[in-house]
Image: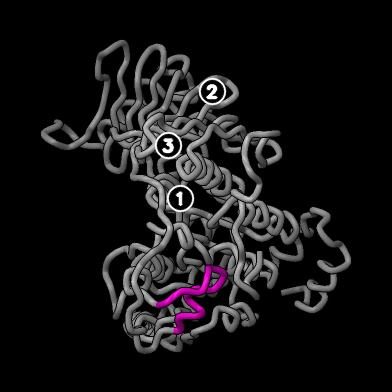
Amino acid sequence: MSITRRRFLTQLSVLGAAPFVLPSRIWSAAHKPNDRINIAVIGAGKQGRYLLEAFMNHKRARVVAVCDVDTTRRLDIQRMVNEFYTGHPEAGSPDCAAYNDFRAVINRRDIDAVCVTTPDHWHAYIAIAAMRSGKDVYCEKPLAHNVHEIKEMMKTVALTGRVLQTGSMQRSMKEFRIACELVRNGMIGKISRVECSFGGPAVLCDLPEETLEPGLDWDMWLGPAPLRPYSSVLSPRGIHKHFPDWREYREYGGGMVTDWGAHHMDIAQWGLDMDKSGPVEIIPPDNPEAVDGGILIYDNGIRVIHQKGFGVHFYGSDGEVKVNRGKFEFWLQGKKIAGFAGKGDEGSLGAALSKVEEEFLKDPKIKLYVSVDHVRNFLDCMESRKKPITDVEVGGRSATVCHLLNQAYYHRQVLKWSPRRMQFARGGGDEAWVTREFRSPWVV
């Protein structure tokens, strides 16, 4: 880097919270097009292993460090990396380091970027620390555990000029981009509502105490969250191949509302051109026991409804667009124009998308950001210093929508929201609901 860490931190201290973007020459010099980008993966669960392989399979990237608070998983993911580079010496060397504490990763000056795949309650603290140390960040969705943390991440990106990619990878899948281009170009007329299908909100954690998993730094796993006894539901024993249920508990995640909701609500935001905004009112379902049926109302009157369905379903005055992973349908005036949703449908998803592109999007007024590979897009932007497809504001505002929906379920009251200020409108909610109590010293 062309600026020392000490000097950089001194600048932060002097400038305080005033937003600014560092000159591009400071950061762009760190990554020349032909240089290898050194990556560290923090979090060795199922998603961490998936992204680890994705980074290793990009020629520009080299995984040089892994970090996890569980010794078994940490050593296993280190083995994966070293075996890969032993078999592919042209891609890197089998000398990947393994750490228990993410701060050891942050302190390494040779690491250019970190991939944060920890449970949600750790996302913000680690990502902010990494950016302040001069590293770019790929952070899994939802971007943070709560709205306060999202706002702090936004401030940090503005202050440091770092690149942050949110792991809302559906934006790098063609079916979702084509669906949103149809909507944004008015092909189904004026939008009245969007239905998004995913599971329910999180619950408070009441899991019974279990004997601690050997080799697990449980205090570090908890980090900013409240101190509580170990449970294998939260941090499974050994090397697991499933997504653990920590996300079902409010102390660590936001249930399926922030898990799958962060994917589908992100597409709703994209299709409605709300990447810099959000809803102004959030209405819980009438049934106090219901875990779906929540409604988000935007200032243009459009409603986004959380209910079981296709995935993301846009309703317009002239037609409908339905989209989910590997599935897509385009309807006009009650007639299916193109689509593929499996279950005996003829043709393929690719053929359906090509038909729509050729017949309806050949020369669109609005052409959305094109990314064909989410990790590649992040690496490209590390070199160009341009915004990635799901930058901090995109990922942050999509996650905010999910957090607001959860708060409506938790408190069973209508919320009023100011998207511009990213805070409750007067009388519209309690500001305590956009943050949490942090366990010292992990305060964001």
User: Nearest the camera: 286 or 341?
Assistant: 286
Q: Residue 96 falls in which quadrant of the image?
A: bottom left
- Which residue in the structure is indicated by mark 2? 365
Disc on res. 177: 3
Disc on res. 99: none
Mark 1–mark 3 contact, CB under 8 Å?
no
User: Nearest the camera: 250 or 395?
Assistant: 250
Residue at image location 28% in from the left, 28% down from the top: 329
Question: Label 2 vs label 1: CA separation?
Answer: 25 Å
**Residue pushed farthest left?**
344
Quarter of the image with the N terminus is: bottom right
The amino acid type found where label 2 is placed reads Lys
The amino acid type found where label 1 is placed reads Ser
Q: Can residue 386 be seen in this view?
A: no
Question: Label 2 vs label 3: CA separation?
Answer: 15 Å
Q: Is mark 2 on a helix, strand or loop?
A: loop
Mark 2 neighbour density, 10 Å: few (under 14) some (14–19) many (20 or more): few
In the picture, measured across the screen, residue 24 lies left or right of residue 408, that is right
Magenta highlight range: 217-229
Image coords of residue 114 (percent x, y):
54, 70
Q: Which of marks 2 and 1 is in front?
A: 1
Q: Can residue 224 be seen in this view?
A: yes
Question: Label 1 vs label 3: CA separation?
Answer: 13 Å
Residue at image location 53% in from the left, 23% down from the top: 365
Q: Which of marks 1 and 3 is in front?
A: 1
Image coords of residue 21 (percent x, y):
77, 55
Mark 1 neighbour density, 10 Å: few (under 14) some (14–19) many (20 or more): many
- Which residue in the structure is indicated by mark 1? 168
Mark 3 neighbour density, 10 Å: few (under 14) some (14–19) many (20 or more): many
User: Nearest the camera: 441 or 337?
Assistant: 441
